[in-house]
Structures are given as C-alpha cells and as structure tokens.
Image (cartoon, coloured by chain):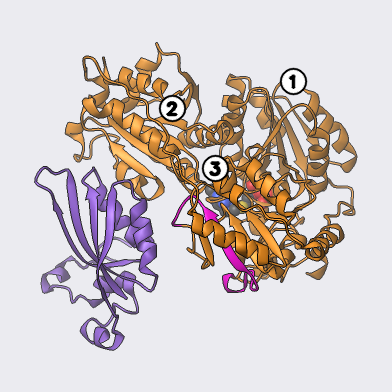
Chain colours: A orange, B purple
Amino acid sequence: MKGSEILIKALEAEGVDTIFGYPGGAIMPVYDALYDSQLKHILVRHEQAAALAADAYARVTGKVGVCLATSGPGATNLITGIANAFLDSVPMVAITGQVPAAYIGTDAFQEVDIFGISMPVVKHSFLVRRIEDLADTVAKAFKIARSGRPGPVLIDLPKNITVADLPNPQFNGNQVELLSRGEAKQLATARAMIQEAKKPLVYAGGGVRIAGATEELRAFVEACGMPCVTTLHGIGSIQGDHELCLGMLGMHGTRAANMAVQECDLLIAVGARFDDRVTGKLAEFAPHARVVHMDGDPCEVSKMRAADCGIVGDIKVSLNFLHAELEIDEWVSTCMQRKEQFQFKYDAPGELVYAPSFLKELSDRSKGEENTIVSCDVGQHQMWVAQHVSFDMPNNHLTSGGLGTMGFGLPAAIGAQLASPESRVVCVSGDGSFMMNVQELATIKRYNLPIKIVLFDNSALGMVRQWQELFFEKRYSEVDLSDNPDFAKVADAFGIPSFRVEKRSEVSDAITRILTEEGPLFVHVIIDTAANVWPLVPPGKNNSEMLEEATV
Amino acid sequence: MRFTLDVTMANTEGALERLLGRLRQRNFTVCGLNANTSANFARMDVKVTVESTKAIELAIKQLNKLIDVAGVEIRAAEEHHPAHHQQARPHVQHHPERKHVTSFEPHPSFQSFELTTSQIGL
Ligand SMILES: Cc1ncc(C[n+]2csc(CCOP(=O)(O)OP(=O)(O)O)c2C)c(N)n1
Ligand SMILES: [Mg+2]
C-alpha cells in the first residue's frame, strides 16, 4: 500500500470524515489518494482558514479537527491557525507535506523547517522518517491531540514517504487516555473550605467545555446554591440566563461578576487559568479569597495565583465530590441584587444601529427549536457577542480567546456548519477582521453553506481605536477604515445574497431574514464609529475599577 | 535560584529542542547542559542547570508535560549569589536575555565583518 493510502486509512481508523486543506507539490501524493477516498475534503482558499475551520469543527463535534497543507508556504500559512488551537486547547492534527527526506536540509524548493517553526505552538510534533512508522504516528498524533489537555499535533510528511510502498501495513486505532479525578485528600480539603465559606463563588472557564463537564458544573452550582461567573470561554457552561449566573468577569465583564469576585472569600476556579484579561492587576484580584483550583493540566494550578487547594484531574468527576449544602442567603441576595441593578441597558440614543441591541434581539429571537451557533472575530463586536448573546452551551459560542485571531470568524463558521449541518450558524464579524479571511466567501458559496454573516461596520479597527481614545490621548493611529469597500457588493460578487442595514428601524426585519432565509446571507450593518465597549477595566487596574460610558 | 535537573526522556525527533525551547519560553535560563543518548539511541539522559526567579516546580511541571519526558528530578539546588555572580559575569543578572552578546569581547578577527552604512548602500 502507498504511504498516501496508509495515511488516508489511518485517518479513517480514527473516525475522521471531514478534513480541511489546500493542495500543492509536496502533498500531491496525498491529494491523489484523496481522489479515491470517502473522506470529505473541504477546499478552503487560504491554509490559515483550513486550520481555523478544523479548529471550529473540533470545538463543535468534540472530535479531533484535521487540516492538510503542502510544504513551505502552505505549511507556514497554517501556523496562525495551529497557534489558535494551541492557545484555546483545541484537539487538532495538522498534516504538512515536506520535501523528500533526501532534500531536507538542502534549502530545496518550498522547504521550510515547519517542524521547528511550529514547535512552540504544538502539543507535540512528528517528522515521519520511515513508512513503517506512518500508521502508528497518525494514531499517536490523535491520541496526544485529544488526551489530557487537548491541543494541536503536527505531522510533517516527506514526499518520499507518501509515494513509497509498504505491503500489509498495520492499523491500531488508539484509545483515549482518561484523566482520573483529583486526589481524595484534596477533594476533602476543598469540600471543607466550601463548607466554611461565607461568600463562595465559582469561576468557570473553558476547561469545563473541554472536560465535557457542563452538566456536572450546573449540578454543583445548583447543589451549593452559589453564584457563578464565567470567563470568555466559560460562557454557556452555565446557562446565560441561569439565575445564579452573574455573567462574564474581567476586562469587559459585568459589574455584578467583577464585584462578586473582588468580595468573595472563596474562589473555586474550574478549568480556568487566571488569564490577564480576567484578573486585571493580579495582586489585587479576589483579594479576600482563598482559592480552590481545579484543572486537568497540573501546569495551570498555582501558575498565576497560588491555590490554597489544587485539584488536578478530571473536572467532570471531581466536581461531583464537592456538593455541599450551604447557608449563604445573604451573599447570594447581594449578588442577585447587583445583577439586577447593573443589567445592560439598551436605550442608547440616536438613529444609528446600536450593535448590543441588535445582538440582544438576535439572541432573544433565535431561542427555539433550532440550535444556534455564533462564531465571531476579534474586536469590539467580539465583546458585544460575549456580553449580549445568551448561550446555553459553551460549544455554541466560537471565539478566539487565547490568541485573539482576527479572521477566525468566517472559517470558524464554515467548520461549525460542516460539523453541525442542522444548526443555524451566524458569523458576527467586524470590518477589519472580515478582510483577514474574506476569501472564504468562496468556500461558503462552493459548498452552499447556509451561514448568516453579520458584519458590524464601524469604519474602524474599533477595539484599537477605543484604546487609543482612552489610553493614548485620542491619537488615532492607523485605525481609520472609512475607505472600506462596499461589503455588500463584495458578497454579491461571491454569489452570496446581501443587504445593508443603516437605521435602527430596519433591524427587526433584518433579523427576521437572518432567522428565516434558507441559504447563505450577508448583512452589512453600519454602526457608529464612536461606539465603545462598556464597562471596561483599564489595563493594569484591579477589577473593581470599572469604567462606564458616563464616567469617561 | 539555580537548579540542576536530571531529565530522562525518549530520544524522539526534536526532543532536546523541545526541552530547551520549553525552558526558555517559560523564563528559565539554561546555564549548563549535558545530554547523552543511550547506546540504542532510544533514550536521552539530560542534566540541565537552570536559573530563574520562578519556582522550579513550574519548570518541572512544564517539562513533565512534554510527551517525550519520562521523569524529572532535582539533582542540586544552589542559592543565587548576586554579588559574587556580578563580579564574574557582569551582565548576566541584569540582562539575562542578552548576556552572551553583551558580555563577550568579540574576537579581533570579527571586526573585519563590521559594515558601515555606506558599504551596504544606505
Ligand atoms: C491578526 C490580528 N492582527 C491584529 C490584531 C489586533 N487587533 C485586535 S482587535 C483589532 C481591531 C478589529 O477591528 P474590527 O474587526 O473591525 O472589529 P471592531 O473592534 O471594529 O469591532 C485589532 C487590529 C489581532 N487581534 N489579530
Ligand atoms: Mg471595525
């Protein structure tokens, strides 16, 4: 059997059915084998999009995402997408063609050391030297990608391997290694701490989704009756409209969430990593709290903030050991009262579309039978999605949290729609981010994916503009995009129906079209260039120093 | 503090690079290294001395996370003596990331490689 056929068989043995890629010289033997295979190959129009789509496909399906590229520029184009998966702990296998082994190290045409280039942003990597190792390497790569804390694994595949022949190759699909629950002693300590606490608070992160522990988290929060805040990636792990959910904490978090964190006497971090966007000034974060830190990755516990009790192991199992009956009515009602008091307001003056209201209405009206997945890009619109769209499941909110990759939204929507054809997929993008992977409109058209794209056009790199306004004395440097192309025409040129929304009065009808039209749709929404994301904790400040629009 | 670690790892492609890269990126400066493969090349035994203001447990956890690493043990710990240290190698303490560049006197023959801006056409 040819090496290229062994690769395809090995992928099939891992249960792969869809891969994202782009062909080229060194990977041609694999594309030749794909020609006869049952694997569904999605041709993107830039390798970065292949990696980002595979990333979203993995988030939605819970399986390992697979992307494929040729050597040299194909491989380097994957890097941003691989790094995105690395920083958000998404299981992925990236396969790159490489020049034949005899040419490695000779600066051959399209030779780059992708094994070396990718090293800091992969969980592990392989360069296949012998065809005998190929099937086993693929199995190992999948196992590593999805076990423990998931992440991307790179397989660099020299062309001489894919064209070589091996009689009777062996395929041993691999089993996932399971994490065990935390140690009994630590669990007992944590339970005692929970029982003693007067103002306990759960701080849930992306690790909840990764561990598949959404139900367990909800059961724990409800059994203890304690309030819960989430990180950007924790959104949806507890239902956005759950009464004990205080919303997102951190830089653009809710006032109720940040105040609860600053006041609590016990912080139970569940699959969260005390990221700087969450903590603000670390030394003043949750200053009165003892910390219980639960994570699958031992490296996270006490990395940023010393834990009084660290529980390393499977969150899904550990959480069940921590249920307790608490008498914390006073604390809970303080939190609830603030949640009520500091609700988001949607009464912004003016005729222009107010993006938070648009998203709130979209969120409210999309509740129903159909599952809705929202992917977003990076910037102000990303924060508005986090703040104003209510999510019931973490997999329905696709956002580039760790790397903050502008250009994530469109490829992510493609990966999500292919992963879940029956879901409604909405991509919320910004005029800056959209241009980073605009070519993927062609992919949407080719596969006729019914993705709804909402582009919030503020004629600016809005998030950067906001920072320049607030922290760089309004010295607006290279953030003006007022010469944007006519985006609706761009979408039309790709064969995607489009329309423009300029006034508040048009929003309702626009949302109706988004919710009811069958195929892909592009909605170009003009918003105020001066709009900012509120509230905001200035960089380097502690989370109780939140700025509101009126205070600036 | 300065620590010497004994690391036992599988000698796979890139294993030593991964180890060094991980230490560097997590802010542990390598100040000594000895690495030997076993006779059949399957295993690599590494003795590495690192210096950092970070707790050594962070380095150990990070190394243990590498797929190739089978075990990490502390072989020696040494208190960092800034005064003595500074005398021996003046720039190590203040500019760890630039220490070699700044503390080496270039060999006289290197000077012939110095280009003026006019030579390179600026
Ligand atoms: C690839 C990449 N380059 C640069 C940045 C820095 N950055 C963060 S937000 C932002 C502006 C995004 O503009 P837009 O997509 O229009 O979103 P808006 O903030 O206006 O909603 C920039 C440049 C980034 N996150 N990613
Ligand atoms: Mg913008």
Tag 2, which secondary structure? loop
Q: Sequence order check: which comes first, mark 3 or mark 1?
A: 3
Does the segment drawn in magenta span residue A286? Answer: yes
Q: Sequence order check: which comes first, mark 2 or mark 1?
A: 2
Q: CA distance from mark 3 to mark 1?
A: 34 Å
**Quarter of the image with the N terminus of chain B in it:** bottom left
Q: Sequence order check: which comes first, mark 3 or mark 2?
A: 2
Residue A3 appears in which quarter of the rendering?
A: top left
Tag 1 subunit? A
Res. A22 mark: 2
> Left or right: where does residue A51 sit relative to residue A60?
left
Q: CA distance from mark 2 to mark 1?
A: 28 Å
Tag 3, which secondary structure? loop
Q: Amino acid at mark 2?
A: Tyr
The residue wearing badge 3 is: A211
The residue wearing badge 1 is: A518
